[in-house]
Image (tube, rainbow, N blue to C red):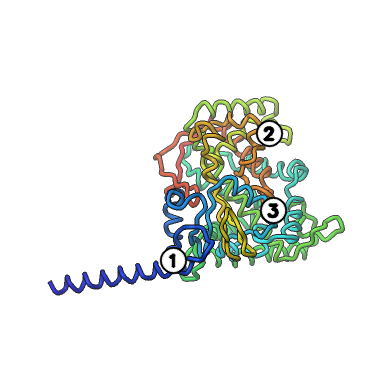
C-alpha cells in the first residue's frame, strides 16, 4: 500500500510539473497582438503532434482558434495561415518584410547558399542562373534528349517482376537529375552519392538536435560526404579543362556569356538544391500516378491512347522530342491531378524580418509563417467532387492559371523547375504505359504527411503490354 502511495505521489508531482512547464511556456508567448493558439513544450513545441497528426492537428487548431493561429513547430515559433486569400497575399509579397523561413535543419543540410534560403538580389541572381539551366530552350535542346535516353534504359527489362515502385521512382528521380547535372560522371559517382543523398533528404525535415542516431545528425554527415564528392568532381573538371554540355558545365563556365558567376560553395549548393527539389516532386508524383492509374482504368486507357498515338508516329528507337512533349495534354492533366489529390507539397514557410501586421495581428520579427496550402486542393468550389481522381478537370487551361493554383508555389518563389519536372514525369509515364501493364501486390498503406510515402513500400507485379 505504501509503495502505491509513493507511485501515486510521484505521478501527481510529475503531472503538476508538466502542467507548470506548459503554462510557463504559454505565458512566454502571451504577447499582446499575437493570434490565438498554443505553443506546447519549451524547445520541442508542438512538433511531435504536427508531424504525427499532420492535417488533423491543423484542422483541430483551426476549429479552436480560426484560420490564423500561433504554434511552435520544427524548432520555431510559428503562425499558421489556412486562409486562401491571405496565403496568396503572403506568397505574392515576399519583399514586404517576409523572406524564406525554412527550418534550421533544412538550412543546415541543404546549405545557406541554396536558392530556397536566400532572398533579395542574391535570390534574383541565383534564380537567374538556375532558370538559364532549365529554360525551355535548354529542355528542348539538351535536357530532354538526356531524359529520354535515361528513361528508355531505366525502364527496360521490368516485365515479369514484382518491384517496389516507391524505391524505383526514387532511384529514377535521383539518377535522371544526376545525369542532367554531370552526364559523363553520373554512372561512376551514383553508387557512392545515392545513399548519402537519401540520408540528406530524411534529415531536412527533423528537429535540429545534433545527437548520435538522429535524422538531423545523419543528414548533416551525409551533406559533408556529398560536399567531398562534388568538390572532387569540380576539381577533376578544372584539371581536365574539357568542355561539358551539362548543368555542372554551365555553372562552372567563366566566359563572358555567363552573367551569373558562382563560387564553388554556391555551385555545390545549387546542385544539391536541384537534386533535392526535383527528387521529392518527381519521385512521389510518379509513384502516385502509377497508383492512381492502377485504381482508375478509364484514366489509364485515355493516357495509354495518347502515348500509343505518339509511338505510332515514330520508329521503335526514335526518342521523345519537344513537339511530342507539347502534345501530351492529357498526361499534363494526370500530373496536375496527381499533385493535387496526393498533395505532394503541403505548404511553404516564410520568416518575418520585422514586426509586421497580418490579418489584424502583429507578428514579431523572426517568427515563421507557415502558408498551409493543402486545404485549397480539396476546395469543392475550385474542384467539384474534390476527392475524385479526375484529370479531365485540367483539360480546361483556365484551371491551371487561376489565382489559387499553388501546387507549384506562387509569387517570385514559384518552382523554377516546374516544366523540367513535368518533362521527366511525362517521359517516365510514356515508356511505362506503352511497355507494361501492372497490378498491385499486398495493398500497402500510404501516408500523406509530412511526406507522401508508403512505409512498407508499394509493390506491383509488372508484365509486358
Answer with mark 3 or mark 1, whichever residue precedes in sequence: 1
Q: Nearer the viewer, residue 11 or 218?
A: 11
Residue 355 % position (x, y): 62, 64
Residue located beneath label 1 in the image: 26
x, y percent for residue 392? 58, 28
Disc 2/disc 3 C-alpha distance (Å): 25 Å
Quick one: quadrant of the C terminus?
Answer: top right
Q: Residue furthest left?
A: 1
Label drawn at residue 317? 2
Q: Quick one: SS at disc 1?
A: helix
Q: How many marks?
A: 3
Q: Determine whether, in the image, residue 214 is placed left or right of residue 10.
A: right
- Mark 2 or mark 3, which is nearer to you? 3
Secondary structure under tag 2 reads loop
Q: How far, Cα to Cα, is label 2 from label 1?
A: 65 Å
Q: Residue at x 68, y 33 (%)?
A: 317
Is 240 left or right of 402, judged from the image as shown? right
Dot label at residue 1: none
Q: Which residue is mark 3?
A: 181
Figure quadrant of residue 360: bottom right
- Image side of residue 32 versus residue 101, left or right: left
Instruction: Identify the residue shown where x is 72% and y is 60%.
Output: 120
Query: Which quadrant holds the N terminus?
Result: bottom left
Which numbered disc, 2 or 1, marks the residue that appears first in the sequence? 1
**Residue placed furthest toward the right:** 256
**Residue 339 at x, y percent in the picture:** 56, 41
Of 306 and 11, the residue lying toward us: 11
Amino acid at each position: 500500500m505504501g509503495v502505491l502511495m509513493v507511485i501515486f505521489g510521484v505521478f501527481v508531482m510529475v503531472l503538476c510539473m508538466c502542467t507548470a512547464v506548459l503554462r510557463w511556456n504559454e505565458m512566454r508567448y502571451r504577447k499582446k497582438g499575437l493570434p490565438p493558439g498554443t505553443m506546447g513544450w519549451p524547445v520541442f513545441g508542438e512538433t511531435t503532434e504536427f508531424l504525427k497528426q499532420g492535417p488533423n492537428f491543423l484542422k483541430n487548431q483551426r476549429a479552436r482558434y480560426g484560420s490564423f493561429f500561433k504554434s511552435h513547430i520544427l524548432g520555431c515559433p510559428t503562425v499558421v495561415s489556412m486562409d486562401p486569400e491571405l496565403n496568396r497575399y503572403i506568397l505574392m509579397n515576399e519583399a514586404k518584410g517576409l523572406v524564406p523561413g525554412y527550418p534550421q535543419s533544412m538550412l543546415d543540410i541543404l546549405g545557406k547558399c541554396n536558392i530556397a534560403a536566400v532572398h533579395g538580389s542574391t535570390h534574383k541572381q541565383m534564380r537567374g542562373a538556375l532558370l538559364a539551366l532549365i529554360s525551355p530552350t535548354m529542355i528542348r535542346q539538351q535536357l530532354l534528349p538526356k531524359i529520354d535516353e535515361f528513361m528508355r534504359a531505366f525502364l527496360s527489362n521490368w516485365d515479369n517482376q514484382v518491384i517496389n515502385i516507391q524505391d524505383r521512382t526514387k532511384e529514377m528521380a535521383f539518377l535522371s537529375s544526376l545525369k542532367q547535372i554531370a552526364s559523363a560522371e553520373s554512372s561512376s559517382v551514383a553508387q557512392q552519392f545515392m545513399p548519402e543523398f537519401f540520408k540528406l533528404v530524411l534529415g531536412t525535415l527533423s528537429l535540429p538536435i545534433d545527437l548520435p542516431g538522429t535524422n538531423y545528425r545523419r543528414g548533416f554527415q551525409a551533406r559533408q560526404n556529398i560536399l567531398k564528392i562534388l568538390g572532387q568532381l569540380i576539381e577533376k573538371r578544372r584539371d581536365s579543362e574539357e568542355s561539358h554540355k551539362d548543368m555542372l558545365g554551365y555553372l562552372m563556365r567563366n566566359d563572358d556569356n555567363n552573367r551569373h558567376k558562382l563560387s564553388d560553395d554556391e555551385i555545390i549548393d545549387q546542385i544539391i538544391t536541384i537534386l533535392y527539389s526535383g527528387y521529392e516532386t518527381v519521385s512521389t508524383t510518379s509513384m502516385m500516378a502509377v497508383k492512381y492509374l492502377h485504381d482508375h482504368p478509364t484514366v489509364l486507357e485515355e493516357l495509354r491512347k495518347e502515348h500509343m498515338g505518339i509511338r505510332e508516329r515514330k520508329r521503335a528507337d526514335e526518342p521523345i522530342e519537344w513537339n511530342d512533349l507539347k502534345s501530351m495534354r492529357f498526361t499534363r492533366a494526370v500530373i496536375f491531378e496527381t499533385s493535387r489529390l496526393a498533395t505532394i507539397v503541403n505548404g511553404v514557410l516564410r520568416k518575418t524580418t520585422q514586426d509586421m501586421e497580418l490579418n489584424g495581428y502583429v507578428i514579431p520579427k523572426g517568427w515563421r509563417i507557415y502558408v498551409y496550402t493543402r486545404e485549397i486542393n480539396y476546395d469543392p468550389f475550385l474542384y467539384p467532387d474534390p476527392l475524385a481522381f479526375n484529370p479531365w478537370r485540367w483539360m480546361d487551361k483556365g484551371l491551371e492559371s487561376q489565382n489559387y493554383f499553388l501546387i507549384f508555389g506562387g509569387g517570385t518563389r514559384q518552382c523554377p523547375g516546374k516544366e523540367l519536372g513535368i518533362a521527366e514525369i511525362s517521359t517516365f509515364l510514356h515508356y511505362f504505359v506503352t511497355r507494361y501493364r501492372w497490378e498491385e501486390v499486398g495493398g500497402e498503406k500510404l501516408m500523406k504527411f509530412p511526406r507522401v510515402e508508403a512505409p512498407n513500400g508499394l509493390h506491383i507485379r509488372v508484365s509486358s503490354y
